[in-house]
Each structure stands twice: as structure tokens, then as C-alpha cells.
Amino acid sequence: MSEIRLQAPVMAPIDGWRPGATREHASAYRTAHDLLSRNAPREALEVLEPALVEEPANRGLRSLRAWAFFQSAHLAKATAELTTLVEEDPTDTWSRHTLGRSLERQSKYDEALPHLRLAAVMTGDPEHEYDVLRVERSAGRVG
């Protein structure tokens, strides 16, 4: 099985925090991001869930929740969250790439490929291109 090399979502600028959001949400975001960087998804979810109850549409918090689900192998939950994030913002390359990785980990290669390909084209990241080749190989599309 391949090593998980998934990068964190880009940190949301605290000064540009959504109107109505509290400093507690900013603190929850930073704390959860730190926990996820240290591979502590369960603890991150404990921090994120109360903030998301108060602000369920916050993309930064939802991205971190998706990352926590991905890290903890709750792949159906990660896929659901990431699908919604991609539908809301098709240019969000982190969500699109992570959605592809989540689908790949569920052996849904044909569903993963369009997301991985588009993320690779959008970013030009060689690691994203490698992910496309790996999934194409797993899907039997490359010899």
C-alpha cells in the first residue's frame, strides 16, 4: 500500500475569517490543524465538531474535518464531505485531490481518476501527476 503523502489544506487567513465567526472558531481551526499535522485526527474532530455546530458552512473547518476523516480511515465520511466541498468550489484543488485519494483508498479507481487528473493539471504538482499514474496502473489502464 502506498504511503499517505497528503498535504494539509491551506491555512485559512485568520484576519479574513468569515463575518460572524468568533475567535474561538479561529482557535479551533489552528488547534485542529496542529493536531492533524501531528496525526491526531480523533482529537482534531473533538475540537472541530463544536465549532462546526455553530458555523456549519465554514469551509476551513469542513476541510479540516475531511482531512481528519481521511487520516482516520473514515473514508465514506471523508468522501461525502469532500464531494460537497468540490461541488461548492470546483477550483479547490486540495479538496479535489483529497477526494481522488479518498476514492482511491476505497479502490474506486474510475471515480478517483477524474479528480486526480484535474488536480494534477490545475496545480502542475509532480506528486499529483504521480498519483494519477499510480491510480491508472491500479485501474489497469497503464501497462
Image (spheres, rainbow, N blue to C red):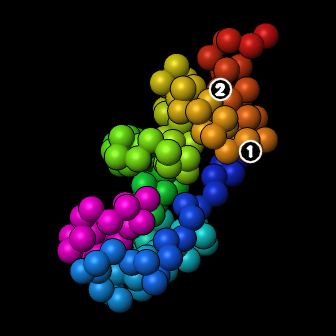
Name the residue rendered at 55%, 77% in the picture: 34
Label whose residue precedes the other's in the sequence (1 or 2): 1
Q: Is residue 22 left or right of residue 107?
A: left
Residue 6 visible in the shown view: yes
Counting from the top left corner in percent of width and height, residue 112 is at: 53, 29
Q: Is residue 4 left or right of residue 50?
A: right
Q: Which mark is residue 80?
A: none
Q: Amino acid at mark 2?
A: Val
Q: Which mark is residue 135?
A: 2
SS assignment at label 1: loop
The image quadrant where one finds the C terminus is top right
Counting from the top left corner in percent of width and height, residue 95 is at: 49, 48
Name the residue rendered at 45%, 63% in the picture: 64
Number of other residues with Cα within 10 Å of mark 2, as a class: few under 14, some 14 to 19, many 20 or more: many
Distance CA(mark 1)–CA(mark 2):
16 Å
Q: Quadrant of residue 126?
A: top right
Q: Quadrant of residue 127?
A: top right
Q: Is residue 95 above or below residue 51?
A: above
Counting from the top left corner in percent of width and height, residue 86 is at: 41, 43
Q: Is residue 88 above or below residue 11?
A: above
Q: Is residue 114 magenta?
A: no
Residue range of the region highlighted in magenta in the rendering: 46-63
Q: Is residue 61 magenta?
A: yes
Magenta stretch prevailing secondary structure: helix
Name the residue rendered at 63%, 52% in the picture: 6
Name the residue rendered at 53%, 33% in the picture: 115
Residue 28 visible in the shown view: no
Q: Which mark is residue 125?
A: 1
Q: Is residue 105 above or below residue 110?
A: below
